[in-house]
Image: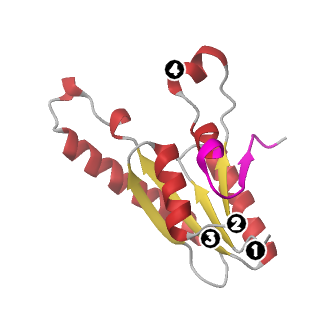
Amino acid sequence: MSFQRILIAIDGSPLAAHAADVGIELARSLNGEVALIHAVDPAQNWVPESGVPAAELIKLAEQDGKRLLAEFAPRATLQAPPLEFVQVGKPATEIVKAAKDWRADMIVIASHGRGGVSRVLLGSVAEGVMRHASCPVLVVGAPK
C-alpha cells in the first residue's frame, strides 16, 4: 500500500498541532501530498442565549477554521502546497467524507485520550474516524 495522499485533521489544540507535524513529516519522508481539514460542528457553535443567529456563528467558526489551516500550511514544505478543507457537520463524518472524496491513502488525527464519562458525553472524533474510514488511520497521542 502506498501512502501518497495524507489527510490531516486539525482542531486547534496543541495535540492536533503535534499530530499535524507527525503527518507532515510522514508525507515528507514518503514524498507524498498533504491536505488539511478542520470540521466545524454546528452543535458546538450554536448558543441560543447569545442572540446571535446560528448561521452567523457557524460562518464565524468557518472563518476561524480557514485561519487555523492557513497557519499550518507553511509547515507543510512539500512538493505541492497542502489543500485546505473546512467542512461543516459532525467532525468524524466530515473527515471520513473528505478522505473519501479526496481519495486519501491515510488520515492522521490526534487523540485527546479522554475516557470514561467525558468520552461518553463528548464522543470521540478519532474513534468515529477509525470506525468509518475506508483508509488507514494514524491516531497520534501526546508526545512522550
The foreground one among 80 and 6 is: 6
Dot 2 and dot 4 residues touching (CB under 8 Å): no
Dot 2 and dot 3 residues touching (CB under 8 Å): yes
Kindly identify the amino acid type of the residue bearing the numbered disc 4.
Leu
Q: Residue at x 73, y 71 (%)?
A: 27
Secondary structure of the residue carrying numbered label 4:
helix
The residues tagged by marks 2 and 3 sit, at their Cα atoms, a distance apart of 7 Å
Residue 69 at x, y percent in the picture? 49, 61
Rendered position, 68 above or below 29: above
Disc 3: which residue: 34
Disc 1: which residue: 28
The residues tagged by marks 3 and 1 sit, at their Cα atoms, a distance apart of 9 Å
Residue 121 at x, y percent in the picture? 51, 20
Disc 2: which residue: 24
Dot 1 and dot 4 residues touching (CB under 8 Å): no
Kindly identify the amino acid type of the residue bearing the numbered disc 2.
Ile
Pointer 2 or 3: first along the chain: 2
Query: Which range is magenta?
Result: 130-143
Q: Residues within 10 Å of mark 4 (few under 14, many from 20)?
A: few
Pointer 3 or 1: first along the chain: 1
Secondary structure of the residue carrying numbered label 1:
helix
Q: Residue at x 79, y 75 (%)?
A: 30
Rendered position, 109 above or below 116: below
Q: Residue at x 45, y 63 (%)?
A: 85
Residue 57 at x, y percent in the picture? 25, 42
Dot 3 and dot 1 residues touching (CB under 8 Å): no
Disc 4: which residue: 121
Secondary structure of the residue carrying numbered label 2:
helix
The residues tagged by marks 4 and 3 sit, at their Cα atoms, a distance apart of 32 Å
Task: Give the residue at the far top of this rendering.
Answer: 117
